[in-house]
Amino acid sequence: MSELNAKKTNYGALTTLTTVFFFWGFIAAGNSVFIPFCKHYFHLDQFQSQLIDFAFYGAYYLGALALFIFGSARGKDIVGTWGYKKSIVYGLLFSALGAGAMIVSVYLNMFAGMLVGLFIVALGFSLQQTSANPFMIALGDEKSGSSRINLGGAVNSFGTTIGPLVVSLALFGSAAAVSDEMIAALSLTKVILLYACVGCLFLGVAALFGLSKSVPDGKLNSSTATGSDVLDSPTETIENIEKSNKAIRLLSVVTALLVVCFAPVFYSYKSNLDWTEDFAEKVRIIGWSGGLLITIVALLTAFVRGSKNPEGWGAMRYPQLTLGMLAIFVYVGVEVAIGSNLSELLKQKKFGSYGASEVAPFISMFWGSLMIGRWTGSISAFEMKKNTRNILRFIMPLIAFSVVLLVGQISGYTVTPLYWYLVCVLVQIAAFYITKDKPALTLGVFGILGVISMIIGLSTEGITAVYAFLSGGLFCSIMWPCIFSLSLGGLGKFQTQGSAFLVMMILGGAIIPPLQGKLADVIGIQHSFWVPVACFAYLAVFAFAVQKILKKQGVNFD
């Protein structure tokens, strides 16, 4: 760790990589128009709409799983051998191929082809995410790795925030928020042109990244590779990695069981099905609950067995990784669940009886809250005086909050009900001062604040409860980088394999949100937010547990 701690940040490579993160945000804005258009254009029923949503998350899981199995079979770390730089370029090119397939499928009116194209786009994203996050950590001191991932997330959030404005101006000549009616009225030619631009953006970013001389190859060059052993020599590759037969068997069984759980769920959405709605709802609840239970049991099994007898478990021998996989699963799940269920909550009388158009600024502020936290968390990615850092910790979130409000105003939203949300932002600022850029402490404190905010929302009504639920975005904002850096800490040659496992757990975004939605049908939308309470509670427990685990291994992020 001493050599690692002394490592200087490669700001040239960091600048180029964060530029890539920015364009990813723009690409997401293109998807936000293209996918809803496809749902309208193909006249999809609920079953087919569910397939589109699940294809995206399923590709993350299956892509990372395939990368792990293929690498284990060859006895090599595929991403480590290619290098992070080349892996990201390959991922971008793969996504460009998927974008092309989607364009052709829409033009030929082939829903199955569009679904395959989306799956390929997401497979590319899976490879990009597997490579980009450990690459961010490797570009400097491992202790500040979470700050660099935060920087990437902050720039990505900015791209996601202003991207819809650019797309709206390009398609409609107005900065107003894009509505379902506007999407339905779009011509096929305009939409194909838009997504052709997205495909070109994939290619352009791949060229920018691949040809950049400031970005090293990012290959691992020793069997004990850590952040300090990365990026040294473009010609050396990592030594063979032992086969992970036990991990492969476990994940293969999990995948098969998940298929068994989810197949009836998707089947239940088919039109003209001879099932009562009550029976269909029970099938869905059992399916999603089964998927959640299988994931939890599998990861806890790996945690116990991998710790006792590490042979054959690969990266899953490390308890910080297996617990971290569950943390990523829960984090992505709670973030998407809150964002997905806010709209229904705000329609209720005791939360304001907001109409469909009036809900939009609140949803925008929830996702904007992620940007507020990430802008603040990224400050430590740069070398500066302590006083300057402390000043920026206070100013940066206020600037980000103002940007979110401004974008909402430009989009035609009424943002006045959100002015006093500033109080929640000030609470987050105080939390940043308390945690002092320590990833475990930051994750723990933000997890506790997430629990508190959800309980306040559960026990109050009106704008107080709305602000409390919205602030879940503030407390989710820095969790991804903290979990990633803590989970990969001390993994050495297994770091990129561990990264692939973490990316697999984005699957949580496909399981936890519908579970909360189904629970809301049974106990009410407000009480369904006990699901986020449980998620935030686990994240807080993980933070303090992983800190002890890492210290036992001689890894200290403090």
Image (tube, rainbow, N blue to C red):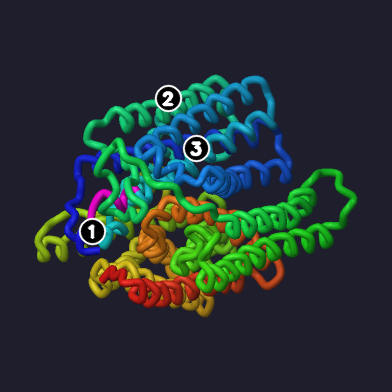
Seen at 74% across and 57% down, the residue is 261
Q: Which residue is mark 3?
A: 124
Q: Which residue is mark 1?
A: 4
Residue 346: % across, % down: 54, 62
Q: Nearer the viewer, residue 31 or 315?
A: 315
**SS for callout 1:** helix
Seen at 24% across and 44% down, the residue is 232
Q: Badges 3 and 2: C-beta atoms under 8 Å apart?
A: no
Q: Residues within 10 Å of mark 1 (few under 14, many from 20)?
A: some
Lateral position of residue 156 relative to residue 537, left or right: left
**Span shown in magenta:** 135-141
Q: Nearer the viewer, mark 1 or mark 2?
A: 1
Quadrant in the picture for residue 440: bottom left
Tell me if residue 530 comes above or below residue 25 in the rendering.
below
Amino acid residing under circle 2: Cys
Rounded to the nearest whole Å, what is the CA distance between mark 3 and mark 1? 30 Å
